[in-house]
Image (cartoon, grey):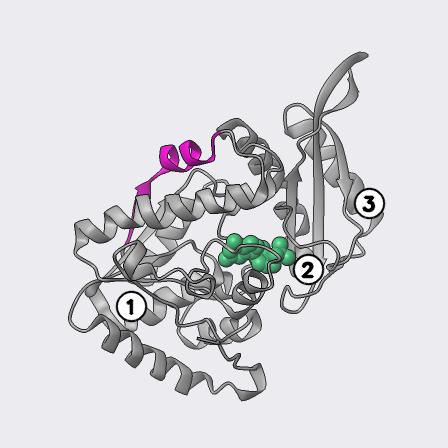
Amino acid sequence: MKIQEIAMRDLDVGKFIEQKVDEISSIAEDGIAVNALSGGVDSSVVTMLAHKALGNRLKSYFIDTGLMRQDEPRQIVSWFKELGVPVELIDAQNQFFGALKGLTDPEEKREAITQAFYKDVFGRLARESGAKCLLQGTNYTDVEETVAGVKRQHNVLEQLGINPEEVYGYKVIEPLIQLRKPAIREIGKAAGLPEEIYERPPFPGPALAARVIGEVTPERVETVRKATTIVEEELSGTGAFQYLAILHEDKVTGLREGKRDFGFQIEVRCWDSEDAVTGSPTRLPYETLEKLAERITTEVERVVSVTYNITKKPPSTIEAI
Ligand code: XMP
């Protein structure tokens, strides 16, 4: 089935929310639905819509893949608790690192995450809770990029000919699939999310694994996680669309306290963009770049080189894998 985009100018926010709440109720009937909350804008909006539709028949899970940012699992669960939406934290770090072990090819890594997510972790949760459907925040850009073969977004299934009901044993409901990010933020605002959630910069489904070039190990994720914290602290006030740190696979020769240090390279990206379809590097002040380099090389062990991406999308993409 071809998905039709709903452009921002054609969106009636109130009507959209009402329609999606009805749709979710009628698909879930009087059963239970499970929801994959990552804390990003899209999955947070879906959680609010599904909570309105199903109340306590919605079981929301935050999957701790081991690939999230510093303190993110605890923070997201506590934000939603304040909104009256209970979210259960599931520790699935071993499954994800196990699935990623030894893989270096970007599409193979994405596929491994997809399988760990839908088959192992959600397969079990759906079976145990008796849920027949899973809700998730796939958006129009995810579908477009996957179908165009740019990147297999971890959450796109049907458009690749995968029938989740046959393969995983549950339906997948995607209320936001016709919308792009700015429209989703409007829905989030109207659905009662606080600004700190509906205005969050986008964060990819495969999380920090999308920012580790080469093998994704707990140690390598920890390096990119520390660099990410610094990048977010320094760039959150810029108003940029998205900013991130990437760990490169190649090491380079550095110099520390007069001695050779064959260490890691971190690449910083900061994007101006409307909807992630195209983007330009933000013209950050040189002082900001210098501060990033100084902090990352002193606060993140073994990093001896920090670079800033100056390439537009296209030909770059926003994330590294
Ligand atoms: P790219 O890297 O393809 O990213 O230029 C476009 C936007 O999508 C986000 N992104 C993802 N979001 N699942 C998601 O839900 C994914 O697999 C995924 N990969 C990239 C990225 O952060 C950017 O905002």
Task: Provide the residue designation for mark 3.
Answer: 287
| Region rendered in magenta | 87-101
Foreground of the two, 11 or 299: 11
Q: Is residue 52 above or below residue 282?
A: below
Q: Earlier in the sequence, mark 3 or mark 2?
A: 2
Residue in the picture at 52% in, 42% down: 108
Residue in the picture at 49% in, 29% down: 218
Check disc 2 and give the amino acid type. Answer: Ala
Check disc 1 and give the amino acid type. Answer: His
Residue 74 seen anywhere in this rendered image of the structure: no
Please give the label number shown on residue 240: 2
Q: Are marks 1 and 2 in contact (CB under 8 Å)?
A: no
User: How many numbered marks, from 0 up?
Assistant: 3
Q: In terms of secondary structure, where does tag 2 sit? A: loop
Q: Label 1, label 2: how many angstroms apart (C-alpha)?
A: 31 Å
Q: Label 3, label 2: how many angstroms apart (C-alpha)?
A: 17 Å
Task: Provide the residue designation for mark 1.
Answer: 51
Q: Label 3, label 1: how many angstroms apart (C-alpha)?
A: 45 Å
Residue in the picture at 31% in, 69% down: 50
